[in-house]
Image (spheres, coloured by chain):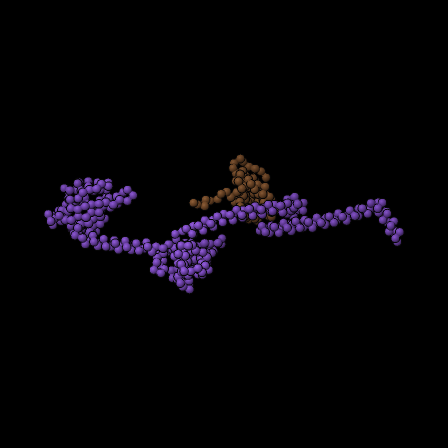
Chain colours: A brown, B purple
């Protein structure tokens, strides 16, 4: 796991390639829980690398249920899951 | 036999074999308890993972030591705590949104009706009650066709049916109910699978507007007839000087048809001797000045001059002139 760059939000990379779900989910959740406040404040975003297809559903779904935003992108022979704070969302109008 | 047993006991105690056996048995008991405990942890972890919508742990995935080191129950408990916190936040937002919607529904000046996919009334606002349900308090759960339209099934041209069929919002500009006119807009509400779960219908009473429009049309017809049959020459002229309207008397004076008159500029029909003065008066009028009586001569189709006298006024909108109206009498008959 490495922290990359000084930009806001800072990327925390979690390389889970070679592991399968639910082990990947547990490790991703552990990181989310450790980084809970930073994620919520938008100071960091979690970048999870996995080559386990099940994880591309379980991790984002659980992250969204926890109030985060999650996206999945295929990159080469693995998936890149980004979990970050949901922010304030769209304005609710006047 | 008793003696032999005691001697064996003494020998065991002396050699430590007895203690070893006891410790072995105790060790086996502890191992058994650990296996039960780990089995319990694994079962509970799997139960929680199933609740989270994922697969159970496999033995080869996490060995017993890693299982204890990783603390999956702690991880899932923390995650559930965050899920609950998020649900509470969402609930608070939903409560606020519900209150906002309720306030909007209550204060809206249009009737709002919510019906489910079976046309059964789920909610309505005070304005809708005022429009359609003055004498009813049992409308909830009834079909909108029975309550509003007074029929067992959807009436012809039913907005609800159109929305369900098209699956998009529909606008029906003039729905007539008990001699009153309504502008009806409706939108479907769909679930995550795209199925229509309910329909929101918005009713605006446009009866007064329709009556006013009809009165305006009637008034327009009346003034049209008056202008048309007047002996005075009546003209409507746009800011560029083109005739927008010429009544029969004016057309007769010019010796042309209405179609020919509309499209001419007033400069084309004013006698050349009067053209510059008339143009100056017209420009002053467009600039917002009041001008006095207009005296001029028109050139008829046969080239003869037709003397006229009258007044010219101009309408303005948003600071700019819209149309100048002139009413003149012929001077040739009297002068």
Please identify the residue farthest to the bottom as the structure is shown: B152
- Taking the image as drawn, is residue B300 in sight? no
The residue positioned 41% from the left and 60% from the top of the image is: B135
Please identify the residue farthest to the left as the structure is shown: B335
At which x and y percent is residue B245? 22, 50
- Taking the image as drawn, is residue B267 in sight? yes
The residue positioned 45% from the left and 54% from the top of the image is: B189
Quarter of the picture containing the N terminus of chain A is: top right
At which x and y percent is residue B141? 46, 60
From the viewer's side, name the closer residue of B190 and B207. B207
The residue positioned 44% from the left and 45% from the top of the image is: A93
Instruction: From the viewer's perspective, tell me whether residue B228 is left or right of residue B170.
Output: left
Instruction: From the viewer's perspective, tell me whether residue B43 is left or right of residue B137.
Output: right
The residue positioned 48% from the left and 48% from the top of the image is: B96
Instruction: From the viewer's perspective, tell me whether residue B25 is left or right of residue B244.
Output: right
Please identify the residue farthest to the top as the structure is shown: A6
Q: Is residue B177 above or below residue B263?
A: below
At which x and y percent is residue B263? 22, 48
From the viewer's side, name the closer residue of A93 and A43. A93
Instruction: Tell how many labels.
Output: 0
At which x and y percent is residue B316? 26, 44
From the viewer's side, name the closer residue of A23 and B315. B315
Quarter of the picture containing the C terminus of chain A is: top left
């Amino acid at each position: 796991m490495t922290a990359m760059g000084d930009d806001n939000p800072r990327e925390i990379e979690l390389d889970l390639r070679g592991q399968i779900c639910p082990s990947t989910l547990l490790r991703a959740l552990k990181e989310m829980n450790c980084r809970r406040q930073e994620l919520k404040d938008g100071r960091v975003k979690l970048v999870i690398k996995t080559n386990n297809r099940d994880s591309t559903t379980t991790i984002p779904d659980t992250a969204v249920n926890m109030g985060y935003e999650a996206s999945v992108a295929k990159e080469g022979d693995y998936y890149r899951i980004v979990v970050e704070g949901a922010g304030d969302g769209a304005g609710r109008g006047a | 036999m008793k003696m032999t047993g005691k001697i064996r006991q003494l020998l065991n105690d002396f050699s430590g074999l007895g203690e070893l056996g006891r410790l072995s048995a105790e060790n086996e008991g502890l191992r058994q308890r650990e296996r039960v405990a780990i089995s319990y942890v694994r079962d509970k972890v799997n139960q929680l993972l199933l609740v989270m919508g994922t697969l159970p742990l496999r033995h080869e995935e996490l060995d017993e030591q890693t299982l204890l080191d990783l603390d999956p129950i702690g991880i899932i408990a923390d995650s559930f705590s965050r899920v609950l916190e998020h649900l509470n936040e969402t609930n608070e937002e939903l409560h606020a949104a519900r209150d906002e919607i309720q306030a909007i529904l209550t204060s809206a000046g249009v009737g709002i009706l919510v019906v489910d996919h079976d046309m059964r009334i789920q909610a309505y606002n005070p304005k809708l009650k005022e429009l359609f349900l003055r004498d009813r308090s049992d409308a909830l759960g009834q079909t909108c066709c029975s309550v509003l339209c007074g029929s067992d099934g959807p009436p012809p041209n039913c907005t609800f049916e159109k929305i369900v069929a098209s699956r998009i919002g529909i606008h029906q500009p003039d729905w007539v109910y008990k001699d009153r006119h309504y502008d009806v807009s409706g939108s479907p509400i769909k679930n995550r699978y795209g199925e229509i779960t309910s329909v929101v219908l918005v009713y605006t009473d446009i009866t007064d507007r329709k009556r006013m429009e009809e009165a305006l049309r009637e008034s327009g017809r009346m003034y049209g007839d008056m202008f048309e049959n007047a002996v005075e020459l009546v003209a409507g002229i746009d800011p560029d000087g083109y005739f927008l309207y010429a009544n029969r008397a004016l057309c007769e004076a010019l010796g042309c048809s209405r179609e020919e008159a509309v499209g001419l500029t007033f400069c084309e029909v004013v006698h050349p001797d009067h053209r510059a003065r008339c143009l100056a008066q017209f420009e002053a009028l467009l600039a917002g000045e009041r001008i006095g009586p207009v005296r001029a001569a028109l050139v008829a189709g046969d080239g003869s001059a037709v003397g006229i006298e009258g007044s010219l006024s101009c309408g303005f909108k948003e600071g700019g002139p819209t149309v100048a109206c002139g009413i003149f009498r012929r001077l040739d008959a009297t002068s």
